[in-house]
Image (cartoon, rainbow, N blue to C red):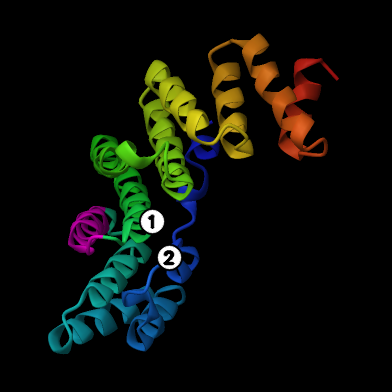
């Protein structure tokens, strides 16, 4: 259940998707080389990032170091580094802030520190929430942060808070298949089959071949 709820936060290299929306350290050739290395040799990437920091102490070198720490399973250090990077990003880089926040939360989850993961997400949610209903892109960012936080609440057994986060996320993105599926799974987990079925039916009206929704509907009907 938790892995489904946390969704795309499990994808570590989310910055690849964020880069086109933000002119910043992600476009630096030195950063790109270091980040690529982090996917294949985390120890070498850590050394490269630390060498880079001695001559060019930038957010890019700090982020590559954080990715390398994550690859080496030094999750607490990665979470700490990513929280600092998020706070150091300039005003206007909210897309990038949100992606780094989600990475930080993932690192904290892997470190077994769910409260710190939730706190990291909550900081960015609070920052963006006032604009979420008026700006579609911001609304999407908040919905993704809420989805991740719902996963953490579920992991901690706080199902009421998880449902509230998913309800909030769906108010911002009513047709989000990922959100509807996560809420359906959560409702099934707490025994509310009728409401879960409503969410699954909404998904199937939009996408009749959605495989996960179809499988869950078949399971609900005993087929």
Q: Residue furthest right?
A: 223
> In this orientation, does residue 41 appear?
no
Residue that badge 1 annotates: 99
Out of 183 and 47, give the one closest to the viewer: 183
Residue 71 point in image, percent of width and height = 37, 65
Q: Is residue 196 left or right of residue 113?
A: right
Quadrant of the rendering where the C terminus is positioned: top right
**At 28% across and 45% down in the image, what residue appears?**
124
Q: Residue furthest front?
A: 134
Label 1: state its secondary structure.
helix
Vertical placement of residue 170 versus 55, above or below: above
Q: Pointers 1 and 2 in contact (CB under 8 A)?
A: yes
Residue that badge 2 annotates: 15
Residue 7 point in image, percent of width and height = 52, 43
Out of 184 and 42, give the one closest to the viewer: 184
| Residue 94 in magenta stretch | no
The mark that comes first in sequence, 1 or 2, is 2
> In this orientation, does residue 37 appear?
yes
Residue 216 point in image, percent of width and height = 73, 26
Out of 31 and 172, give the one closest to the viewer: 172
Residues packed near mark 2 inside 10 Å, few (<14), some (14 to 19) or many (20 plus): some
Quadrant of the rendering where the N terminus is positioned: top right
Residue 135 point in image, percent of width and height = 43, 45
Label 2: state its secondary structure.
helix
Vertical placement of residue 212 versus 106, above or below: above
Q: Which residues are magenta?
A: 76-91
């Amino acid at each position: 259940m938790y892995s489904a709820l946390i969704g795309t936060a499990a994808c570590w290299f989310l910055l690849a998707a964020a880069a086109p929306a933000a002119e910043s350290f992600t476009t630096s050739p030195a950063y790109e080389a270091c980040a690529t290395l982090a996917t294949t040799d985390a120890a070498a990437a850590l050394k490269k990032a630390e060498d880079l920091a001695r001559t060019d102490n930038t957010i890019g070198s700090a982020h590559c170091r954080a990715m390398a720490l994550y690859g080496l399973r030094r999750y607490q250090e990665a979470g700490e580094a990513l929280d600092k990077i998020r706070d150091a990003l300039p005003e206007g880089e909210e897309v990038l802030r949100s992606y780094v926040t989600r990475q930080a939360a993932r690192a904290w989850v892997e470190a077994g520190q769910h409260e710190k993961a939730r706190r990291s997400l909550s900081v960015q949610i609070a920052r963006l929430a006032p604009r979420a209903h008026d700006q579609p892109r911001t609304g999407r960012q908040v919905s993704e942060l809420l989805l991740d936080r719902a996963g953490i609440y579920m992991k901690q057994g706080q199902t009421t808070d998880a449902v509230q986060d998913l309800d909030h996320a769906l108010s911002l993105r009513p047709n989000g298949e990922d959100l509807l599926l996560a809420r359906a799974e959560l409702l099934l987990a707490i025994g509310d089959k009728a409401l879960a079925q409503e969410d699954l039916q909404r998904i199937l009206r939009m996408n009749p071949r959605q495989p996960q929704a179809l499988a869950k509907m078949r399971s609900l009907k005993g087929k």
